[in-house]
Image (cartoon, helix red, strand yellow):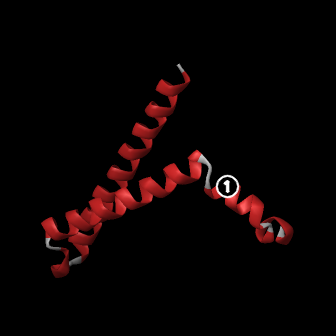
Amino acid sequence: MRYLANNEQLIQRMADSYPMRRAAQLVVSLMYRTKSLAREQGLHEMTPERFKSFISMFKNNVKQELEGVKKELKDKKN
């Protein structure tokens, strides 16, 4: 395992691969979406109920993004 973790060529090839780049794009996209949602929802005044609501919305957004990616991958295969 250490060999794989310390293998610079392998890590560079993985970083340049489409799945890794796409995963990074999704993370950044989710980060910006949640940041804008936090501003819209006024999460600086967070109560436990609002926090639960926010987490629920976040989970729904993640599910939607994953479904969209799955659909994209299926469309590319066909």
The furthest residue to the top: 78
- Image vertical order of residue 53 relative to residue 23, above or below: below
Provide residue 28's location: percent of width, then percent of height.
Answer: 39, 61
Asked if residue 39 lies left or right of residue 3, the reply is: left
Which quadrant would the N terminus be assigned to in this image?
bottom right
Provide residue 46's location: percent of width, then percent of height.
Answer: 20, 78
Q: Indicate the quadrant where residue 59 lies.
A: bottom left
Which residue is at a point 32% across and 58% down the rendered structure image? 58
Given residues 28 and 9, the one toward you in this image is 9
Asked if residue 25 lies left or right of residue 36, the reply is: right
Provide residue 5's location: percent of width, then percent of height.
Answer: 77, 69
User: Disc 1 on helix, strand or loop?
Assistant: helix
- Image vertical order of residue 35 relative to residue 63, above or below: below
Given residues 9 and 46, the one toward you in this image is 9
Which residue is at a point 44% across and 44% down the rendered structure image? 66
Amino acid type assigned to the residue bearing label 1 in the image: Met
Q: Indicate the quadrant where residue 39 lies.
A: bottom left
- Image vertical order of residue 42 relative to residue 77, above or below: below
The furthest residue to the bottom: 45
Q: Say few, some or many: other residues with alpha carbon within 10 Å of mark 1 (under 14 / 14 to 19 / 20 or more).
A: few
Asked if residue 28 lies left or right of residue 18, the reply is: left
Given residues 36 and 43, the one toward you in this image is 36
Q: How many marks?
A: 1
Q: Indicate the quadrant where residue 30 lies.
A: bottom left
- Image vertical order of residue 31 relative to residue 77, above or below: below
The residue under label 1 is: 14
Provide residue 72's location: percent of width, then percent of height.
Answer: 45, 33
